Image: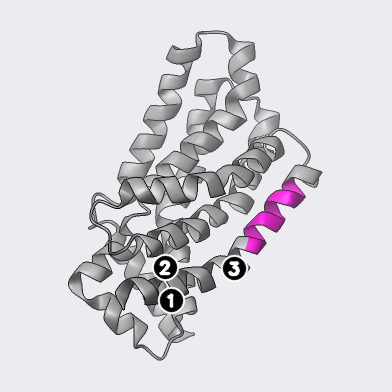
Amino acid sequence: MSAFWALVARDIKLAGRLGGGPFVGLGFFIIVVTMVPFGVGADLDLLSRIGPGVLWVAVLLATLLSLDRLFQADFEDGSLDLFLMSPLPVEAQVLAKCLAHWITNTVPLIIAMPAVAFLVNLDTDILLPLIVSLLVGTPSLSFIGALGAALTVGVRRGGLVLSLIVLPLYVPALIFGAAAGTGDLTGTPMLFLGAFSLASLALAPFAAAAALRISVS
């Protein structure tokens, strides 16, 4: 377990050095949310209704920005070959990288949520369910994204291909997340969202590890 947490700490430290790290995703998230009122108009009732969905889409897109760096830097400097030969199972290494990615790229967006929710006229009663839905559902974005990043790690300019792979797989998280953000904390959408995250946790590290072995071989 010490090797696992050492890898998590390593990726967290490196996150700020690779393309701006979490600040790029946070800035993108704020810009997307800020532009929505200009696009749909100043109808406060409309903004309040679509607010949870808009915020979920903004978080999803901001998370997508950093996925191509999940394994690419290690692939380019040769570290990935060493990781594959490490005593620590590749599946555990993928899990560590997903955890570091979630902490550095998604958690700042969730922390910033109360500060930007007013831009879409989000009711204070909905803010807590929305934040809980993001805490429950966004880990699946990193797990599924790891699969896409592993499949495209050896592809030049694979960011577009990565987006085409993972965006359709993100649809369940988006549907259940937006619905859970407007309802009860123990409602059916929240339960389905939690089940989706658990399923991605159980399956994605193994699929991503197999994809890495194929991509690097």
Q: Judge left or right: residue 56 versus residue 181.
A: left
131 magenta-colored: no
Q: Is residue 179 left or right of residue 98?
A: right
Q: Nearer the viewer, residue 119 or 215?
A: 215
Q: Who comes first in sequence, dot 2 or dot 3?
A: 2
Task: Give the mark toward the camera: 2 or 3.
Answer: 3
Q: Main secondary structure of the magenta part?
A: helix
Magenta residues (range): 190-199
Instruction: Check residue 32 in the rendering and tell me which mark sits there, or answer none.
Output: none
Where residue 187 sits, quadrant-wise, is: top right
Q: How many marks?
A: 3
- Dot 3 corresponds to which residue? 203
**Distance from label 2 to label 1 (Cα)?**
6 Å
Mark 2, residue position? 97
| Residue at disc 1, secondary structure | helix
Q: Residues within 10 Å of mark 2 (few under 14, many from 20)?
A: many
The residue at the point 76 percent across, 51 percent down is 191
Instruction: Please name whichever residue, 207 or 88, is drawn nearer the observer in this view of the structure.
Output: 207
Q: Which residue does the numbered mark 1 point to in the structure image? A: 93
Q: Is residue 111 visible?
A: no
| Residue name at image x 46 percent, y 43 percent | 109
Of the residues under marks 3 and 1, which one precedes in the sequence?
A: 1
Q: Is residue 8 above or below residue 137?
A: below
At 46% across and 57% down in the image, what residue appears? 102
The answer to whether mark 2 and mark 1 are in CB contact below 8 A is: yes
Q: Compare residues 162 and 78 and report the one nearer the observer.
A: 162
> What whole-number distance in Å separates the C-alpha atoms at marks 2 and 3?
15 Å
Q: Residue furthest left?
A: 77
Residue 195: in magenta span: yes
Q: Secondary structure at mark 3?
A: helix
Instruction: Return the residue found at the far top.
Output: 42
